[in-house]
Structure formats: C-alpha cells, structure tokens
Image (cartoon, grey):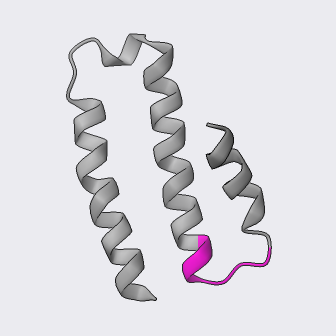
C-alpha cells in the first residue's frame, strides 16, 4: 500500500510544478480549481493509505472539482 502512495505522490510532485510553471497562472480561476484538485488528490491518497473511515468526504470534493 505504501508503494501506491509513493507512486501517487510522485505523480503529484510532477504535476504541481507544471501548474506553478506558468507566468500568468496565478490570476486565473482555472488555476485555483486545478490546485484544489491537486490538494484533494493528495489528501485522498493519504486517507486511503491510513484507512480512514471518512475518506468519502475528500473523495466527493475531489470528484466534484
């Protein structure tokens, strides 16, 4: 299970600099939703790894983003 967490965090660590790399990215609403989606994915990954009972709450937020 830890290897899946490390793989997912590796994907997120590549995804985040690509979001932050743009010069004008900080001013767009789509950037805010992309960052929210990225943070929700990280929260869901850790919640699934530690077998939280209420993992469905951040998962629902991630799906709607």
Residue 47 position by quadrant? bottom right
Q: Is residue 52 magenta?
A: yes
Q: Where 62 falls versus 19 (above or below)?
A: below
Q: Residue at x 30, y 59 (%)?
A: 11
Q: Residue at x 69, y 55 (%)?
A: 58
Give the camera-side residue of 12 and 27: 12
Residue 46 position by quadrant? bottom right
Q: Position of residue 37 (x, y in %)?
A: 52, 42
Instruction: Answer left or right for 24 relative to 1.
Output: left
Q: Which residues are magenta?
A: 47-53
Instruction: Answer left or right for 55 relative to 10.
Output: right
Q: Position of residue 1 (x, y in %)?
A: 46, 89
Q: Where 54 falls versus 43 (above or below)?
A: below
Q: Where 64 falls versus 42 (above or below)?
A: above
Q: Is residue 62 magenta?
A: no
Residue extending farthest to the front is: 63
Instruction: Answer left or right for 21 relative to 15.
Output: left
Q: Residue at x 56, y 60 (%)?
A: 43
Image mark count: 0
Q: Position of residue 10 (x, y in %)?
A: 27, 64
Q: Residue at x 31, y 73 (%)?
A: 7
Q: Quadrant of the C terminus?
A: top right
Q: Position of residue 62 (x, y in %)?
A: 62, 48
Residue 24 position by quadrant? top left
């Amino acid at each position: 299970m830890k290897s899946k967490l490390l793989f997912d965090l590796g994907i997120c660590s590549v995804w985040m600099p690509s979001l932050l790399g743009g010069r004008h990215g900080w001013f767009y609403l789509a950037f805010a939703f992309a960052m929210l989606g990225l943070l929700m994915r990280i929260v869901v990954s850790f919640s699934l790894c530690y077998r939280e009972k209420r993992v469905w709450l951040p998962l629902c937020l991630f799906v709607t983003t």
